[in-house]
Image (cartoon, rainbow, N blue to C red):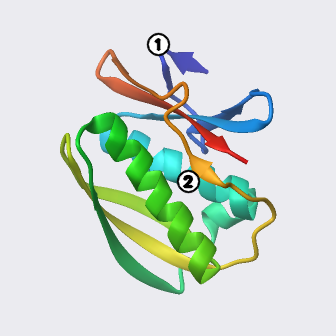
């Protein structure tokens, strides 16, 4: 069920949209921080399978990224998660974006040892969108697979 752009009553507040040859994610949140976190969850679910989203973390880590603007921050954030998951063979769940400004993000993430079931090459600016409607947020990003 959707209200405006935001999924109101779902357990997984993101969706994977059809896109030729790439992964297109749309994530929702009551706040921009929640939408950014849900975009990260969607990426982890794609990489490691849906069951990883509910896995209990073995450890926790803080991740911080900066960028020139909000769009670049979304790309930098997801790229950072992708780099860590690819180099450390871990899924990063749960995700809580604790600090968010126009140019800086700080998040607390759980680490779960997991085997990737799919691959993402890069997070792109293609069709990137951050929208606010009725006080809720929707972010859309395309990843090269």
Q: Nearer the viewer, mark 1 or mark 2?
A: 2
- Indicate the quadrant where residue 97 lies: bottom left
Residue labelled with disc 2: 41
Could you say which disc has been placed on residue 4 in the image?
A: 1
- Of pointers 1 and 2, the one earlier in the residue sequence: 1
Residue 2 lies, in percent from the top left, at: 56, 19
Taking the spot 73% from the left edge, 38% from the top edge, the residue there is: 22
Q: Is residue 31 visible?
A: no
Give above or below for 18 relative to 102.
above
Q: Rate crowding at label 1 as few (under 14), some (14 to 19) or many (20 or more) other CA atoms within 10 Å.
A: some
Residue sitting at x 18%, y 44% = 101
Front residue of 129 and 68: 68
Q: Relative to residue 86, is residue 78 depicted above or below?
A: above
Q: Is residue 16 visible?
A: yes
Based on the displayed image, in which of its 4 quarters is residue 72 positioned? top left
Q: Which mark is residue 69?
A: none
């Amino acid at each position: 069920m959707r209200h405006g752009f935001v999924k109101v009553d779902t357990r997984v507040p993101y969706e994977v949209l059809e896109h030729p040859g790439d992964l297109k994610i749309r994530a929702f949140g009551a706040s921009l921080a929640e939408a950014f976190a849900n975009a990260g969850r969607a990426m982890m679910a794609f990489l490691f399978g849906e069951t990883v989203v509910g896995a209990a973390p073995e450890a926790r880590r803080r991740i911080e990224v900066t960028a020139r603007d909000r769009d670049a921050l979304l790309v930098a954030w997801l790229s950072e998660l992708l780099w860590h998951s690819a180099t450390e063979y871990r899924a990063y769940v749960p995700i809580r974006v604790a600090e968010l400004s126009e140019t800086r993000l700080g998040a607390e993430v759980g680490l779960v040892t997991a085997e990737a079931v799919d691959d993402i090459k890069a997070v792109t600016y293609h069709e990137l969108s951050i929208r606010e409607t009725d006080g809720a947020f929707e972010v859309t990003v395309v990843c090269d697979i």
